[in-house]
Image: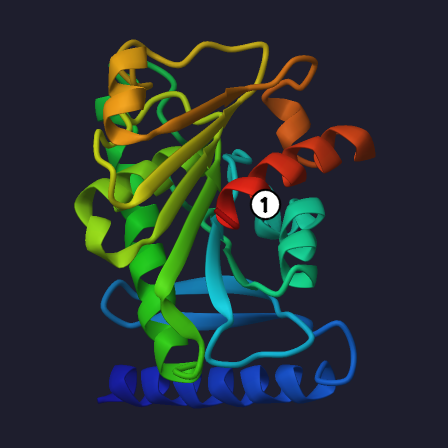
Amino acid sequence: MRKEYMTLLYRVVTLLLFVLSFSLNALAQKEYSVCFYDSARSRVIPITVYSPAKENKNTQVVIFNHGYDSNQNPKSNQTYTYLTRFLAEKGFYVISIQHEQFNDPPLAMEGNLAVTRMPNWKRGEANILFALETFKALKPMLDWSKLILIGHSNGGDMTMLCATDYPQLFSKVISLDHRRMPRLRTSSPQLYTIRGCDYEADTGVLPNEKEEKEYQITVVKLDGITHSDMGERGTKEQHNTINQYLYRFIKK
């Protein structure tokens, strides 16, 4: 009984903080963070929202998934502001999920990584689905029919897994240099990947030329932009290049 009471109290406090944060930022850039509690998994899920100046029934939603940060940074989801703020300025409602916590098991670095990292990706997938249902309830007026899923590196692997398991939920799926989880071979949702210049994906992860044409999958290889440059280490010029490719695909 006490656990149920604490869960209910946590939800009420979380909702109040969400409303308060939204109110305080209503006249500003409308960028705020909030924690939700997934009672089914007894897990707190921090989320940062990057909201456009105006929200209406035509506002599309982007769910963003950060790369692996060794469980050391409680705000990894806030280190891609070059991208999340850019999309918000372009009119998208961006939900950036914090996937890592200090006490989470470390990401597997040995074995068949497509297998040994699956528990991490499955946890990320559950976070994505939870955030989706939570914000659908909080923001029913947004356009949820054209949902966009984006992820970098390990977050890109989570993105590909979620799109594989729930393709009907998404309109467009974009990875920034994910390397382990094989991409869907499908034309729906629309698939797009931006590749860095320093690492190759594992065998079978990316489509071959025939599959690219058959399923209209777009693969873009960038010169002079590395895997790490796609995170906070990149220059303004590099980030601008990534954003332009990203936006061009989203607006198709």
Kind of residue at badge 1: Tyr
The quarter of the picture where the N terminus appears is: bottom left
Q: Horizontal and vertical percent for residue 138?
A: 42, 83
At x 54%, y 90%, the residue is 16
104 relative to 1 in the view: left or right: right
71 relative to 209 in the view: left or right: right
- Residue 188 is at least partly visible in this image: yes
Q: Secondary structure at mark 1?
A: helix
Q: Quadrant of residue 121?
A: top left
**Disc 1 residue crowd, few under 14, some 14–19, many 20+, Cα 10 Å:** some
At x 59%, y 46%, the residue is 76
Q: Quadrant of residue 142?
A: bottom left
Residue 211 position (above or below residue 36): above
Q: Horizontal and vertical percent for residue 93?
A: 55, 66
Q: Horizontal and vertical percent for residue 238?
A: 74, 28
- Residue 235 is at least partly visible in this image: no
Q: Quadrant of residue 88?
A: bottom right
Q: Horizontal and vertical percent for residue 60?
A: 48, 65
Which one is nearer the viewer's eye here, 110 or 96?
96
Residue 206 position (above or below residue 231): above
Name the residue carrying label 1.
247
Query: Tell me, what colour scheme is on the image?
Result: rainbow
Residue 146 position (above or below residue 243): below
Number of callouts: 1
At x 65%, y 59%, the residue is 90
At x 52%, y 43%, the residue is 66
